[in-house]
Amino acid sequence: MESRRNKDRTVREDGKPDRARTGRMAAEQMKKEKAAPGKAQEGREKPVQGKADRPKTEKAAPGKARTGRENPGQGKAEMSKKEQLKPEKLSKKKSRCPVSALCGGCTMIDVPYEDQIQGKQKVLEELIGEFVTPDPFIRMKAPEHYRHKVTSVFAPDYRGRPVCGIYREGTHEVIPVKSCLIEHIQADRIIQTIFRLLADFRIRVYDEDMDRGLLRYVQIRAARATKEIMVTLVLTDPVLPSRNTFVKKLVKLHPEITTIVINVNDRNTTMILGNRETVIYGRGYIEDVLCGKRFRISSRSFYQVNPLMTEKLYNIAIDCAALSGKETVLDTYCGIGTIGIIAAPLARRVIGVELNAEAVRDAQQNIRMNGLTNVEILQGDATRFMMELAAAHGDHIAAGQENSGSAVSGKIFTGKPGKGVLTESEEGIPVKSWEGLLMETEESIPAQSWESLFPVPGEDTPDILSPDALPGNVDVIFMDPPRSGSTEDFMRAACTLRPKKIVYISCSPWSLQRDLAFFTQNGYSVRKAIPVDMFPFTGGIETVVLLTHNV
């Protein structure tokens, strides 16, 4: 009879764990996740326009597949709610997490951490090994409860009773979750308190099949350094029953909450956040400290979910740039300006480009909070900006030029009062007034008015990029694109500008492989690749890559 040891192929003949085999198994699991259609991978969350939460897909017709929330997979199973089995009946394998087999978020929750790292290292080496040998992974010492942004779905179960948690893998059935091994502990506790308050305040959860109900999601953002906590209630209507009483009750139970925001999402969609917001408690944002700089974070702005490892990630990226204080730096896909602001004391000039309007607003405040005078933020699409910048320097961009449109909306925000450029006045407000408006009256301005103040550029936007905003020679480009990677137009423009160094922060080794192939065929060499384990227990792989121009 075959022994139990022989059956367990992750155990060696001497009885010790076979690290090499389990590492290979972890690598294979990540490959399956990549190959599986519709399955979401843990990692950086990106917006459609900028770095807020990336929407999933529009609501599908009954019986058709559609996406889930942040962690789960997608594709709705064709069965009614009554036919869907309860989690405890489906999960047979004993796991550290009772719903690990269902949610699809932590695909390696039961894999030893060392084996996870080996598996990720193997995947990365296979994908980019032709360009460079990756350094060993930078690891977390305590790889649990690292997610400082937590989103919980509120919905009725198949009996009509309210539940909160995450979508079951491959469906839109909500699996009740009270706590998660990778999520911020206090965030989970606040979500459970809100769930218990539903009955007292007669708050109905949203039923997406019937398209009725009030509460869709609760999102918690927690600052690691300042301990500030923001609660965002995603509702279908801006009116919350007994709002003041609800706020008092919640804050009394959780005095660590510093602000509460109502986000209105009344669209028939699987997007998490809507465009309208009302602050009902506190300032409407939180602040955190990262690499010695202070940052303001609002509900829709992108901020890495693992702040501890983010410090290591950004320090590595800035070390790769080896700035001397004389460089002009472009921080593309800059979000709230984190990388550029951290790098600013080491550079002559930093220009950030970000499409998301709210992130630009936060970036402007962050520049001011940190007392910087050499950082500017442009609101616009990074690819279009790069193409216009390359064209302005007298070079021709071969592909995509005819449909490039305009790069920016014409608003340049700078830490120097009155130094910005506004060639077309928005609603008659000069640049200097924008700063006062942001500083003094932001909380009194309705959320929807911010959309008019920071319009998203469209195809018909006139070319209003001021020549004064354009840098001369660009020495370093930081690029931190979405999981899908950069665009060919962006990379072609970057190669046209010929910066001495490009620091590429990747959250997907698959798109990184494709992009490195482009750069190496267009005048750049890969000097180093340093992976950072931003998302333990998942297949997420974050990598900092240094490219230098071939002289």
Image (cartoon, rainbow, N blue to C red):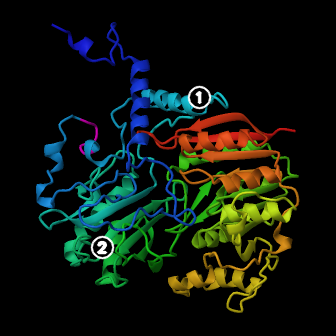
99 and 503: which one is in front?
503
Magenta span main SS: loop
Whole-angstrom CA distance, mark 2 to mark 1, is: 44 Å
539 and 189: which one is in front?
539
- Reply above or below: 135 against 254: above
Q: Which residues are magenta?
A: 95-99
Q: Which residue is mark 2?
A: 215
Residue 98 part of the magenta-drawn span: yes
Residue 361 part of the magenta-drawn span: no
312 and 109: which one is in front?
109
In the rendered structure, which disc, 2 or 1, sits on the residue that comes first in sequence? 1
- Residue density around tag 1, few if under 14, some if 14–19, many if 20 or more, within 10 Å: few
- Reply above or below: 40 against 249: above
Percent from the top left, x then y, of residue 189? 32, 58
Whether tag 2 and tag 1 are in contact, CB under 8 A, the answer is no
Q: Amino acid at mark 1?
A: Pro
Q: Is residue 52 left or right of residue 71?
A: right
Numbered label attached to residue 136: 1
Percent from the top left, x then y, of residue 85? 14, 51
Please give the count of numbered marks on the rendered protein: 2
Q: Is residue 116 left or right of residue 137?
A: left
Q: Which residue shows up at 38% across the image and 56% down it?
A: 186
Which image quarter holds the N terminus?
Answer: top left
Percent from the top left, x then y, of residue 290? 62, 54
Numbered label attached to residue 223: none
Secondary structure beneath dot 1 equals loop
Q: Amino acid at mark 2?
A: Leu
Secondary structure beneath dot 2 equals strand
- Reply above or below: 551 against 371: above
